[in-house]
């Protein structure tokens, strides 16, 4: 399902995705009201949405989607053509599953959809830097803190911290995948795990580990 501010953007997204994968593209909508209506009528597997629609920002909508049960879960991919869009971190905190912050490219958009459906996510360098700050990566820690982090499912692993540091320097996931001789999809899945940890740490009062 596509939710964009205007018909031109919606048409570009639809043209890029139509026939590019094993999915059916629904007609784009352009407001929060239309989006909520369509989500209630025909819940999609994945919602592609801009940071704001004609009637306002999408933060509350994303938070509402987070309240759905796992069986009703709708994946969300936030798309913007501005790599330095400061709204992205707030949208990740609100519950976005992935972000694509690049100038429009049909192949990149289709690739981001494939990754999101496979459990992966894209990331911009400045977002990686903000996540390093959020998790305190690189700051000195006592030995007792390090032991606690090793047993904490919400702390970054050494590999996750290293990945964020490289991404923060401007490396792209594809470059790092080739360098490490792994699939790009493995690294996008790692980014998605980091996003989940960030979201849980921000609402730890609701966290229950079974």
Image (cartoon, rainbow, N blue to C red):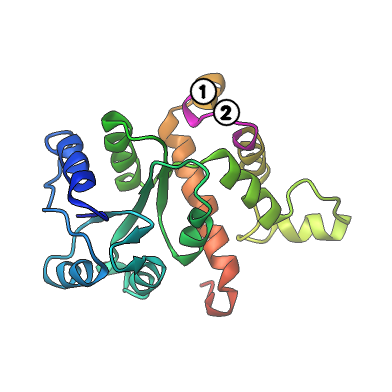
Q: Badge 2 local density, few (<14 within 10 Å), some, or many (20+)?
A: some
Residue 171: mark: 2
Compared to residue 41, the image places residue 168 above or below, namely: above
Which residue is drawn at the image coordinates 52% and 78% (left, top)? 206
Could you tell me which secondary element the residue under label 2 belongs to?
loop
Q: Which residues are magenta?
A: 167-175
Image coordinates of residue 5 in percent, x first then y, are: 27, 55
Which residue is drawn at the image coordinates 34% and 46% (left, top)? 116
Task: Name the residue nearer the viewer: 31 or 16.
Answer: 31
Residue 175: mark: 1
Quarter of the rendering containing residue 113: top left
The residue at the far bottom in this view is: 205
Image coordinates of residue 133 in percent, x first then y, are: 70, 53
Q: CA distance from mark 1 to mark 2?
A: 7 Å
Which residue is drawn at the image coordinates 39% and 41% (left, top)? 81
Image coordinates of residue 170 in percent, x first then y, are: 59, 31
Left or right of 141 in this view: 130: left
Which residue is drawn at the image coordinates 29% and 68% (left, top)? 55
Mark 1 and mark 2 in contact? Answer it, CB < 8 Å.
Answer: yes
Compared to residue 67, the image places residue 199 above or below, namely: above
Q: How many marks?
A: 2
Q: Badge 1 local density, few (<14 within 10 Å), some, or many (20+)?
A: few
Q: Is residue 97 magenta?
A: no
Q: Is residue 169 magenta?
A: yes
Q: From the image, which quarter does the N terminus lie in?
A: bottom left
Quarter of the rendering containing residue 186: top left
Task: Name the residue nearer the viewer: 60 or 74.
Answer: 60
């Amino acid at each position: 399902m596509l939710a964009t501010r205007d018909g031109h953007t919606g048409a570009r997204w639809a043209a890029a995705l139509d026939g590019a994968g094993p999915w059916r593209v629904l007609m784009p909508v352009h407001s929060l009201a239309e989006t909520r209506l369509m989500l209630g009528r025909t819940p999609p597997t994945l919602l592609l949405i801009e940071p704001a629609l004609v009637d306002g920002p999408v933060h509350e909508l994303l938070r509402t989607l987070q309240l759905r049960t796992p069986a009703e879960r709708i994946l969300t991919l936030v798309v913007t053509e501005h790599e330095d869009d400061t709204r992205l971190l707030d949208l990740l905190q609100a519950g976005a599953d992935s972000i694509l912050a690049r100038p429009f490219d049909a192949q990149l958009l289709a690739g981001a959809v494939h990754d999101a459906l496979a459990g992966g996510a894209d990331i911009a360098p400045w977002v990686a830097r903000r996540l390093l700050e959020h998790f305190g990566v690189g700051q000195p820690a006592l030995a007792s803190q390090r032991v606690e982090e090793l047993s904490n499912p919400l702390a970054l692993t050494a590999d996750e911290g290293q990945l964020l540091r490289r991404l923060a320097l401007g490396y792209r996931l594809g470059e790092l995948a080739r360098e490490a001789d792994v699939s790009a999809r493995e690294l996008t899945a790692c980014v998605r795990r980091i996003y989940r940890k960030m979201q849980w740490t921000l609402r730890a009062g609701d966290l229950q580990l079974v």
